């Protein structure tokens, strides 16, 4: 659990982070969004004390983060910086092994971890391990950057626009990988992004910041249905609201008994994708099947539209 | 067709060869200090040797003019240089009158020009092949092996420089080691002091301007003046600090030479360390901190390795500069190859000057090639792949 308690940072007499309080539950993903310069990076960097706050306190599992030296704290917290920040003079494998080495893991354990992480990120360990960062594409570099942050199996992972440089397809892939890894290790993640689609895709809770202040912190559909301010509403995007609601849930949540004609829809796709499929094929309902091909009833256009409706 | 294929460097080489071939190849003097008489290639060598040498030169010039590929250029240039080295020794034996121990035969303008011209062609050939650092070191070792073999074979025994060497063999090697101690010792001291000083300058910006400006001023003091400035304080130290005299510290001699070389070396060392550290990508520093490295770990594991190529460039500058400057040490009794240069100048004995100058140039060249290779091996760039 990460408790950020009344945290403030002042640069040149101006509060760039202004009395922010929020609590991130263990094993969840919190995403921070906000305009450029709103203090997202600064807030993130106060968690691992790359920046020292002027007021307030941050507790990790109930413990003040100032009780141990900064560098030791940072070895326990994974950090993927804005732009990958790989060491150009070290191979991919050496980059990933940096923190395990700092904390004294033995060679075999480190090598096994490097291999596991590269494989998790769909990079061939024998091919990519010995390469230097400049021999990788931008997307591969970013994935290695995230792998390095995860190497020592931190409970907490801080990520600052980790997928900024990726094209939409690779980005979606990287996001899915990240969610899979988060489930696998039970990591608590704080992630900063500019991309609202990414925020809705990844977040258990979203924090919206503007000019150093936290405007709202809540689950994605709360942001859509009850935006705290006009700014939050604008961030969510008024015309995107119904689609955001649909994008957060799977078809399986709306499956009902019954039958329908035409090709089936997988239970795991988002409700937004199901709506698109029905609109495209001109159907009012489609059969739903689970991933092993078992029939799960049907999903109707009406149910999807009902789900996408805002408060009266 | 052929005329459009003529290479510019090739044309230059042919022009230089034409001029060099008509200049004297070797000079014969009746003793070591008088003016000599020049001999062209045809008269400096037995007929078949002269013919062979001229043929090799002509063929290589044609290659230079018409072929742009690296390998034919390098091979023909190397052939000419080996022939020049071999035949200059033969010319010495051929021209020296029998039983005359005073007569001196030395390479003349023609020889030096031809050597320079084909060294240029060889360098062009090598650079066209873009050899990696290891390959370049191999070329260097090959060239040194050839020269060593010629020296050991006695082929050059009749050349004037070697005659100067023969009467001074013991002194030559002691001056050589003195020269190396001066150049390398002052370099080592400059690295030991300059790199930490550079790190301080980079970390504490307030010190940077003061240190670099002071070293800049030192750099502008002419070497003779610097020796002069050092005589008084070092003399005082020798006389008053217990043990200093026993350590060999004196107002004149090797000590001020060493100190002067050290002072000249500091600026390039400090400046390159600062520049190297300043060039470390901001993101790498950030990541190193964010990942939990302590300040010392960041310096040793990230910043220093990334700055190393620039620091090595500083070492290269200093080493080549010190090998050259160490000749000046002889002026204040500091020893080194300069001893022969200044003795030779005093006696107007060119051969003696060469005995000091040639090894100095050779040393500087070898150090430059070796350090360039080291720098290449330590820099990370896409270029490394085709090395
Ligand atoms: N070290 C610093 N000294 C002075 N001002 C700073 C410093 N670091 C950040 N700031 C200022 O604090 C404000 C917030 O910066 P921060 O990097 O947290 O923004 P951000 O929300 O991450 O923006 P972006 O989305 O562009 O990355 C900015 O106005 C920035 O100029
Ligand atoms: Mg930022």
Image: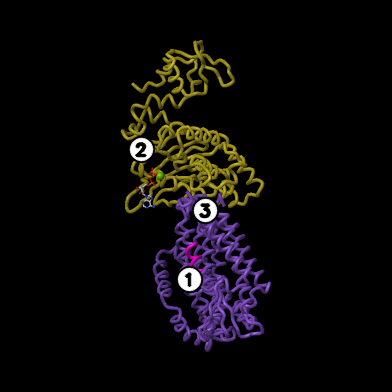
Which marked residue is nearer to the observer: mark 3 or mark 1? 3
Q: Is residue A307 in the magenta section?
A: no
- Above or below for A223 versus A135: above
Which label belongs to residue B266?
1
Q: Dot 3: what SS? A: loop
Which label belongs to residue A215?
2
Q: Which residue is mark 3?
A: B68
Residue visible at 51% across and 72% down?
B23
Q: Dot 1: what SS? A: helix
Q: Are marks 2 and 1 on the same chain?
A: no
Per the rendered image, the range of residues in magenta is: B14-20
Distance between the Cα atoms at labels 3 and 1?
43 Å
x%, y% of residue B353? 54, 80
> How would you rate the neighbour count of disc 2 (Cα within 10 Å): few for under 14, some for 14-19, many for 20 or more?
some
Which chain is home to disc 3? B
Which chain is home to disc 2? A
Distance between the Cα atoms at labels 2 and 1?
56 Å
Instruction: Identify which residue, A18 or B253, lies in the foreground.
Output: B253
Which label belongs to residue B54?
none
């Amino acid at each position: 659990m990460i408790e950020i308690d009344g945290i403030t940072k002042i640069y040149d007499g101006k509060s760039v982070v202004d009395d922010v309080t929020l609590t991130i539950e263990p094993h969840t993903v919190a995403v921070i969004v906000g305009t450029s310069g709103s203090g997202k990076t600064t807030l993130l960097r106060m968690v691992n004390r790359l920046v020292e706050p002027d007021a307030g306190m941050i507790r990790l599992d109930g413990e003040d983060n100032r009780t141990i030296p900064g560098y030791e704290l940072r070895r326990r917290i994974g950090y993927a910086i804005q732009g990958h920040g790989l060491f150009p003079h070290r191979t991919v494998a050496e980059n990933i092994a940096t923190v395990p080495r700092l904390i004294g893991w033995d060679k075999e354990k480190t090598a096994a971890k490097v291999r596991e992480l590269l494989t998790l990120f769909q990079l061939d360990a024998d091919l990519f391990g010995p390469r230097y960062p400049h021999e990788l594409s931008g997307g591969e570099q970013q994935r290695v950057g995230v792998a390095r942050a995860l190497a020592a199996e931190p409970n907490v992972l801080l990520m600052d626009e980790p997928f900024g440089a990726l094209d939409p397809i690779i980005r979606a892939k990287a996001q899915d990988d990240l969610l899979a890894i988060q489930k696998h290790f039970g990591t608590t993640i704080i992630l900063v992004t500019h991309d609202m689609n990414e925020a809705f895709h990844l977040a258990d809770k979203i924090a919206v910041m503007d000019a150093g202040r936290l405007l709202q912190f809540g689950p994605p559909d709360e942001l859509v249905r009850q935006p705290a301010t006009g700014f939050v509403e604008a961030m969510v995007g008024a015309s995107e609201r119904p689609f955001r609601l649909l994008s957060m849930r799977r078809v399986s949540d709306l499956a009902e008994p019954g039958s329908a004609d035409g090709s089936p829809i997988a239970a795991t796709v988002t409700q937004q994708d199901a709506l698109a499929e029905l609109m495209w094929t001109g159907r009012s309902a489609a059969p739903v099947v689970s991933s092993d091909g078992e029939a799960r009833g049907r999903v109707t256009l009406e149910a999807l539209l009902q789900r996408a409706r805002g408060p009266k | 067709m052929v005329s459009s294929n003529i290479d510019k460097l090739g044309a230059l080489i042919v022009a230089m060869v034409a001029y060099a071939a008509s200049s004297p190849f070797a000079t014969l003097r009746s003793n070591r200090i008088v003016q000599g008489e020049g001999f062209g290639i045809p008269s400096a060598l037995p007929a078949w040797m002269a013919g062979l040498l001229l043929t090799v030169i002509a063929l290589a010039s044609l290659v230079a003019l018409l072929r742009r590929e690296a390998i034919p250029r390098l091979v023909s240039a190397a052939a000419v240089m080996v022939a020049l080295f071999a035949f200059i020794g033969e010319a010495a034996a051929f021209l020296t009158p029998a039983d005359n121990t005073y007569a001196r035969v030395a390479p003349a303008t023609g020889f030096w020009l031809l050597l320079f011209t084909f060294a240029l062609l060889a360098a062009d050939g090598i650079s066209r092949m873009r050899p990696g650092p290891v390959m370049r070191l191999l070329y260097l070792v090959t060239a040194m092996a050839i020269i060593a073999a010629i020296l050991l074979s006695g082929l050059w025994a009749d050349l004037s420089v070697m005659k100067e060497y023969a009467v001074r063999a013991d002194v030559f090697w002691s001056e050589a080691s003195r020269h190396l101690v001066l150049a390398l010792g002052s370099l080592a001291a400059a690295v030991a002091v300059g790199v930490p000083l550079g790190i301080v300058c980079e970390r504490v910006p307030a010190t940077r301007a003061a240190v670099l400006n002071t070293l800049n001023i030192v750099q502008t003091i002419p070497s003779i003046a610097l020796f002069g400035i050092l005589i008084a304080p070092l003399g005082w130290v020798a006389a008053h600090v217990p043990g200093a005299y026993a350590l060999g510290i004196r107002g004149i001699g090797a000590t001020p030479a060493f100190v002067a070389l050290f002072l000249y070396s500091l600026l390039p060392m400090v400046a390159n360390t600062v520049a190297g550290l300043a060039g470390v990508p901001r993101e790498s520093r950030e990541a190193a901190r964010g990942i939990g490295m302590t300040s010392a770990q960041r310096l040793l594991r990230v910043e220093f390795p990334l700055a190393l190529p620039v620091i090595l460039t500083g070492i290269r500058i200093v080493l080549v500069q010190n090998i050259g400057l160490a000749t000046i040490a002889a002026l204040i009794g500091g020893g080194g190859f300069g001893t022969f240069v200044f003795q030779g100048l005093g006696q107007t004995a060119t051969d003696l000057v060469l005995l000091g100058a040639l090894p100095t140039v050779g040393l500087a060249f070898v150090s430059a090639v070796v350090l360039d290779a080291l720098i290449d091996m330590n820099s990370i760039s896409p270029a490394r792949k085709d090395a």
